[in-house]
Amino acid sequence: MNIAYDALTALVLCCIFLLVSLLIWLFKGRDDDLIVVREHYPPDGLNCVELAYIYKGAVDRRDVVPLLLELSQKGYLSIEQVDQKGKVNCVRILKPYDGNNESEKIFMHGLSQYGNIVEKQEITESFYRILDAVIISIRKNFKEKVFYKSTLILRNITWVFAIIPYFIGVYPTVKNYYPNSNVGTLFSIMFIVATCIIVSGVTITFGSKALQFYKKIIVVIAGPALLALLIRFFGEALGSRGMIYQVVYWSCVVANIFQIIFLLIIDKRKPYGIDMLGRVMGYREHIEEASTAQLENDVKNDPEYFSKNLACAFEFNMSGKWMKKFNDIPMDMPKWYGRFKTDPYSYKTFCSFITLAMAEYTVAMTSTPKQNRSR
């Protein structure tokens, strides 16, 4: 009786590596206990992008766009209606940036390159570079403050754990199927690498806090389809030495999924990161759950309370809920809102205008050049 030692070794390693990764997470990668503290303003004066990084551990281009509102509230910009219905708008630069926040400085400098009045069509397919520079700045200033650097090494270890069983159980099986050893080597490496990329890509996408939901759905549907194509192409080679190697392959796929999950969650926060996360979560809870009576009191103490927190409400995807809470609370018009000519101020009109403007500027600022556009 022939015993498939390589297959059995691969299966055993899958189990051992998963157990080791679990232990790494339990003792070195899991965050300490979190205490949620209610806050009525962004803690420690964090701007909206910094707050998003603390909350999610990552930011993307869409997370940077609410800086438009943040900087408007601070007096550097105004967002103005160009037509009476508010469907055409522009951003006006009121004064040069004189603060000491690096991400805000990069954003303002990027806007100023387009002149004192910035329209959507001017920044379309070009402003994304500024957003990327802001993201790099946020990571540089906060990553080591928030997360332990040692967790990066532990995450890389779990990545290696995810790959080794493939090469022990799957590589020789596929390689030996092809008469030409060079072709067999190439195909077996392609098969393993492609499988790891697909499985890792789907798992990371599904677990991402920064990615939009529709993009997650696309990847989650496309991933298994690509995996099915791989099996269709390499299935005969994979089973050439017996069904045990099919079992090994699928065991490796499942183990790969769990290893990637560990890779995502082994990201231990420092005491500062834990403390700030608790405060940011408490602030988010306030935006989501604050009663009308609480908000009336906040506005009484600070007439600009609504607009000071509007950028963060957009950051948490709660702008509609935040605006609705103030429907019946008397407030002055935000100083940075430029309504059309002498139209009377209406809170409802303002909310509709800002919602539309932010949606349009998000599309414009995050857009990249079309690769196949004719020159």
Image (tube, rainbow, N blue to C red):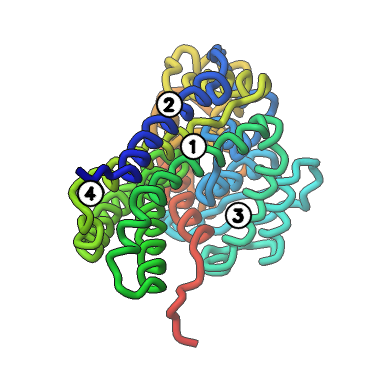
Q: Give amino acid for label 3.
A: Leu
Mark 4 vs mark 2, CA separation in Å: 22 Å
Q: Give amino acid for label 4.
A: Gln
Marker disc for residue 246: 4
Residue at 23% across, 45% down: 2
Q: Quadrant of the N terminus?
A: top left
Marks 3 and 4: in contact by CB < 8 Å?
no
Mark 1 vs mark 4, CA separation in Å: 25 Å
Total labels: the figure holds 4
Residue at the spot of label 3: 131
Nearer to us of marks 4 and 3 is: 4
Q: Give amino acid for label 1.
A: Leu
Residue at 45% across, 86% down: 374
Residue at the spot of label 2: 19
With respect to residue 293, does 245 lie above or below? below
Mark 4 vs mark 3, CA separation in Å: 45 Å
Residue at the spot of label 1: 263
